[in-house]
Amino acid sequence: MTVGYPFSAVVGHDDLKLALLLNAVSPAIGGVLVRGEKGTAKSTVVRSLAALLPRVAVVAGCRFSCDPAAPDPSCPDGPHASGLAPHPRPARLVELPVGASEDRVAGSLDLERALTEGVKAYEPGLLAAAHRGVLYVDEVNLLHDHLVDLLLDAAAMGVAHVEREGVSIRHAARFLLVGTMNPEEGELRPQLLDRFGLAVEVRASRDPAERAEVVRRRLAFDAGPAGFAAAYAGSERDLAMRIAAARERLPAVALPDDALRKITAVCAAFDVEGMRADLVMARTAVALAAWEGRDEVTSDDVRTAARLALPHRRRRDPFDDPFDSPFDGPGGQGLDEERLEQALSETSSEGGAPDKGPDDGPDDGPDDGPDDGGPSGGGGEQAPVNEAPVNPAPVNPGAPYRTRLLAPEAAGRGGPAGRRGRTTGESGRTVGARTPDGRLRRLDLAATLAAAAPHQRGRGRGRDGSGLVLRREDLRESLREGRESNLVLFCVDASGSMAARSRMRAVKGAVLSLLLDAYQRRDKVGLVTFRGAEATVALPPTSSVDLASGRLARLATGGRTPLAAGLRRAGRVLAAERLRDPRRRPLLVVVTDGRHTSGPDPVSAARRLAGVASVVVDCEHGPVRLGLAGRLAAALGGTAIRLEELAADHLAAVVRDVRRVA
């Protein structure tokens, strides 16, 4: 038997452990999202929780874990007789792999019974196995969209519906949802993010003594797991008993009107969207009171609940880090404590939420003039072309705006999953079956059996040795539909000629807008910048658009314009990515004013990239224009557009042009 690492032996991570324990007390809170860098024991802590959960009483032989005291009337294994003896078993922790198929998650036709008995029967999936337990999704941010949809539906309704392969099933699926993720590998789909009741940020300790204790315990566990676990058996037993006692106390915990007003006032003060945050905070505060052995929620409970339930609900666009937003306090972590305390103190037992004062609105900072940050990119003086110094304080990007689709249409044969265009291939939802046009790629057993059914007439059923008659023309393969994503590589001019404050703010706003589009379409993005005498890969291709936007915000400017070097570096990045993932189609977006002042001829460098779908965003400004951006686009075989044409209303023609490139 495998021995797991004890929950009570984990060093630090107090917020994570508290969030998991509160969900164990009250699963109605809605689960936990664990967000943090690699190597921080996220998975270890989550997996160790299952050993603490109270045992579950189930109906013996029920594959859907029905409670004998209140069996599910729609259980596929039912109906269950009343008064059945309970069959206790440990609570399950079911892991949902990122690469799981829809059949594995939702369930499918029972192949054994179909082949041996010739009957349709349902084989439960992971959602059924997780009922009344824990469903753990490691790398939840990398989960395919169609699996996310299944998960969202089940988590919201507590019921899983399966309509496929001639099977129509409905079964209960209530579980504690726990997801872990590394934000460097990409952010979480916003709809799923909000479904998690609580969220915590996990980071490795910077205290040498604490880090030493982590290493000491891990080495001891690896040397003798059974002995190490035995040393913490008492602590584990105490935690399990405390969870059980808190569960019993939970229904009797009171939520006074004063505490409820504090909850709603805090949610209003932090401008969270919808009402889910209020409900989650209320449930968390009640669970915390039960965990602490109290019969009534206090202000401290509300304060702690806010710190766990609100940080991930304050995003306004995909580039607002949920744990590093304008509402954060010093250090960029958690909630702004001053704002939290103000909301709590201004809500009296008789009054409601505090009124917003005249100075409580968002601070937009100093006015940079009418041309700052908009799609037009106008305004501001032209910086010297050759000798502009590096900008010591990088300019923040302008506000992002909606752009049109800058991509060729889907290739149609199964690139990586995204949202660029519909495609048939190896991933996505099963939408039907077809006769293979060559090599059989993925057998659709249900459709194959249906096609072979006419040959079975008059033959015996069951295990009588008659066998299944199957012909070559009966074979069917699954037809799957998904959406492709691209690699969008930005090649951005950071030279001195782009350094005028208002213009660089507009340029960064434009690139940020294109990054926003890439995020929404599940694209991989990379960032190459060029200035001075060289080009730099500011961000290797990644699925984390947060990283790209952060690098963009910190981008300094100045020096000459080595445009050819930038294009050559972009070409090397694209070539390397083509070897790594040949199915992902590249899109090159060059952002420059075309003021080439250093290095070889950029038009010759551009010709070597011909054939890659390309867009050149022309930022040239001033009364004298050289027109190099247009020549670059022609050499690339792409399209040139002015910076002011990036807004959605101006891009219809651009989209058509880029599609013709493909």
Image (cartoon, rainbow, N blue to C red):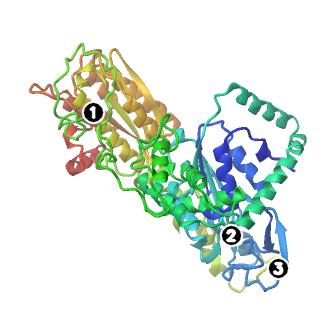
Q: Residues within 10 Å of mark 3 (few under 14, many from 20)?
A: few
Name the element at disc 2.
helix
Identify the residue position indicated by label 2 in the image.
Answer: 252
Residue 190, image x, y percentages: 47, 54
Numbered mark located on residue 464 in the image: 3
Identify the residue position indicated by label 1 in the image.
Answer: 505
Name the element at disc 3.
loop
Residue 650, image x, y percentages: 20, 48
Which of the 4 image quarters holds residue 464? bottom right
Q: Earlier in the sequence, mark 2 or mark 1?
A: 2
Quarter containing the C terminus? top left
Name the element at disc 1.
helix
Residue kind at label 1, given as amino acid type:
Arg
Which label lies toward us, 1 or 3? 1
Residue 423 visible within the image: no
Residue 104, image x, y percentages: 65, 62
Residue 339 visible within the image: yes
